[in-house]
Image: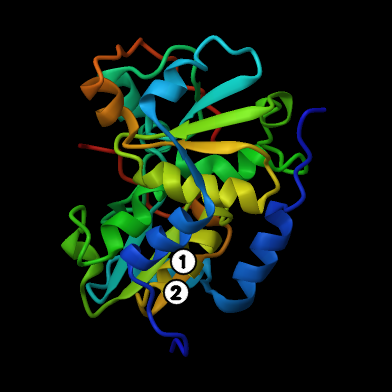
Amino acid sequence: MNVISPKRLSQILSEAEAVITQISVTDARNLLDDPDTLFVDLRDVREIERLGGIQGAHCCARGLLEFAMDPESPYFREVFTQYKNYIFYCDNGLRSTLAAQLAMQFGLQNVLCLSGGLEAWLEAGRRLEPLRWTATAD
Amino acid sequence: MAQNITKGVKALLAEANETVNTMSISEAKEKAQDPTYVFVDLRDIRELQRSGLIPGAFSCPRGMLEFWIDPDSPYHKPVFNQDKTYVFYCASAWRSALSAKIAMEMGLKPVMHLEGGFTAWEKAGGPIVPRTT
């Protein structure tokens, strides 16, 4: 039996939106070739294989994120210590909003959430490239 | 090193395991076919394709969880709106602990997670079906 009052998704999202920083498609586009910035694709493998993603992005499904960020975890990925800025994205900016909040809680610095996600990226006439899914799950 | 991670999964897991109840593999073997229980597989599709899943389990990739639980979400799945007991599992009961905690916070109840996850299920000779869809 839960003693806390249930949390709606809208509340979860608005709490995350209050603390994260968004980046527009235009500004994100300007960081595509920045060697200090890593784009992180949080979608699942099927979505990535179907549509592709942003050129050079690192694929880390949202469901694996905590385990990929923690250096003590057996699933740790070094990319989460190697860059100065991280741009998280998904299809529409919702999963990336929650993921950016989580990453901030983990202490990752300069995490930005791509506003509107890939839908906004495509609307702005940006292209997607084939991406390679990074397998890691145990 | 450009980054310094300060919070770890160990602490998160300890926190989750304080509030989330576990179901043993032997109990799960009895309940897996019980219509008042819903087994939820949180692993990603590749893992399911590779190893199969518990018969009757519902596949919900962990990254979609909150979006599928909330009845007001455009992505809501009615499977999460039943008067049943939810048993979450993943490969080794880490993702399931964190997920069950969030589901409980969102009001889903009762929610448990499978002790040792699919790895323990497999080791104990639990039935497995291939992923079909």
Q: Chain of mark 1?
A: B
Q: Which residue is mark 2?
A: B105
Which residue is nearer to you in this view: B23 or B63?
B63
Q: Residue at x 29, y 63 (%)?
A: B69
- Residue B70 placement (x, y as % from top left): 27, 65
Which residue is nearer to you in this view: B54 or A12?
A12
Q: Residues within 10 Å of mark 1 (few under 14, many from 20)?
A: some
Among the 4 quarters of the image, the one containing residue B68 = bottom left
**Number of marks in the image?**
2
Q: Residue A138, can we see it?
A: no
User: Are the two marked residues, 1 and 2, in contact with CB atoms closer than 8 angstroms?
Assistant: yes
Mark sitting on residue B102 = 1
Q: Amino acid at mark 2?
A: Glu
Say whether mark 2 and mark 1 are on the same chain.
yes
Q: Residue at x 52, y 49 (%)?
A: A20
Q: Amino acid at mark 1?
A: Ile
